[in-house]
Image (spheres, rainbow, N blue to C red):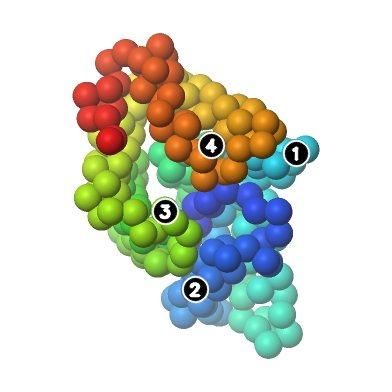
C-alpha cells in the first residue's frame, strides 16, 4: 500500500476562497492520482487545532481530509479512487509532530510499500531532514515540495528563509532525541497558538502576530528548554 502524507498550513476561514490551499491540495491530489489510481492508498492529512479565528474550531487534518474526499467523490473520478482511505492525524501543532504522529498511523496500518510527503516548497529540506530521522530507512520516503504559497512569507530574503529552516531542522532533530523534549516541544507550540490568538483578538493582523511570536519565542524557549539549539541560532 502506498501512503501519502499531507501536512497542513493553518486553518483559513474558507478553504475554497483561500489563496494557497486549493492550489496545494489540487496538485497533491493529482500526484496521488498519478501514482495510485485504481490501487490501495492511505492518505494522512496532518494538523491539529491551530485555528486562530474565534471560536477556534476544527483541525487542519479534518479540513484537508474533507476537501480531498470531495475531490475523490466527483463523478469524473469514475471510482478509480475507491480503494483510497483517508486517516486524519489531528493532534499535531508543528511540522515535527505532523511526521511523528503520521508515522504512528502508517505503522498501525502496516504493509506500506512507500511513503510520499507533500510540503510547501521552502520547507523542502526541513521535511527531508526530519522525515529521514522519523521514518528511518526501512520504507522508501519521497518528499514532493509544492510551490503554492503566494503570501509575503514566500518572498522573504532567501538567506532569512534558509536560516529559519536550519534553526527549525536543528530544533526538531534535538527534540526527537527523547520524549521529554517532544513534550516540551508540544508545549512550546501550545503557547505559540495561545499568543497568536490573544494578539489577533486584540486587533493585530496575523502577519504582525507571527512577527511578534518570533520576537518573543526565544524568551519562551529559554523558559521551557534552556538547552534548545534555537537559543544559539536565533533568526534575525
For mark 3, what is the residue? 153
Query: Image height check: is 216 above or below 133?
Result: above
Task: Identify the mark nearer the N-term, 4 or 1.
Answer: 1
Q: Nearer the viewer, residue 144 or 78?
A: 144
In which quadrant of the rendered view does residue 165 lie?
Answer: top left
For mark 4, what is the residue? 209
Q: Secondary structure at mark 4?
A: helix
For mark 1, what is the residue? 54
Residue 27's disc number: 2
Residue 222's disc number: none
Asked if residue 101 lies left or right of residue 141, the reply is right
For the residues bearing labels 4 and 1, Cβ distance under 8 angstroms: no
Q: CA distance from mark 2 to mark 1?
A: 30 Å
Residue at x 36%, y 22% (from the top left corner): 218
Q: CA distance from mark 2 to mark 4?
A: 29 Å
Q: Secondary structure at mark 3?
A: helix
Query: Viewer-nearest of labels 2 and 1?
Result: 1
Residue at x 28%, y 35% (from the top left corner): 235
Residue at x 39%, y 58% (from the top left corner): 154
Query: Image height check: is 112 above or below 171?
Result: below
Give the total number of marks visible in the rendering. 4
Judge whether residue 82 can be spotted in this image.
yes
Q: Secondary structure at mark 1?
A: loop
Amino acid at each position: 500500500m502506498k501512503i501519502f502524507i499531507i501536512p497542513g498550513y493553518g486553518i483559513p476561514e474558507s478553504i475554497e476562497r483561500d489563496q494557497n490551499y486549493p492550489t496545494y491540495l489540487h496538485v497533491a491530489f493529482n500526484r496521488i492520482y498519478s501514482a495510485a489510481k485504481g490501487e490501495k492508498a492511505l492518505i494522512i492529512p496532518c494538523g491539529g487545532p491551530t485555528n486562530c479565528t474565534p471560536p477556534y474550531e476544527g483541525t487542519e487534518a479534518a479540513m484537508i481530509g474533507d476537501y480531498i474526499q470531495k475531490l475523490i467523490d466527483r463523478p469524473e473520478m469514475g471510482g478509480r479512487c475507491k480503494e483510497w482511505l483517508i486517516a486524519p492525524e489531528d493532534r499535531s501543532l508543528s511540522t515535527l509532530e505532523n511526521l511523528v504522529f503520521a508515522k504512528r498511523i502508517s505503522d498501525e496500518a502496516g504493509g506500506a510499500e512507500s511513503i510520499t510527503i507533500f510540503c510547501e516548497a521552502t520547507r523542502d529540506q526541513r521535511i527531508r531532514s526530519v522525515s529521514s530521522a522519523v521514518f528511518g530507512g526501512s520504507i522508501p520516503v519521497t518528499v514532493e515540495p509544492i510551490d503554492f504559497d503566494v503570501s509575503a512569507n514566500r518572498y522573504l530574503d532567501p538567506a532569512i528563509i534558509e536560516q529559519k529552516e536550519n534553526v527549525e531542522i536543528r530544533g526538531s532533530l534535538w527534540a526527537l532525541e527523547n520524549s521529554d523534549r517532544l513534550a516540551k516541544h508540544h508545549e512550546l507550540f501550545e503557547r505559540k497558538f495561545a499568543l497568536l490568538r490573544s494578539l489577533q483578538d486584540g486587533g493585530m493582523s496575523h502577519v504582525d502576530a507571527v512577527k511578534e511570536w518570533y520576537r518573543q519565542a526565544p524568551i519562551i524557549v529559554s523558559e521551557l528548554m534552556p538547552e534548545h539549539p534555537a537559543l544559539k541560532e536565533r533568526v534575525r
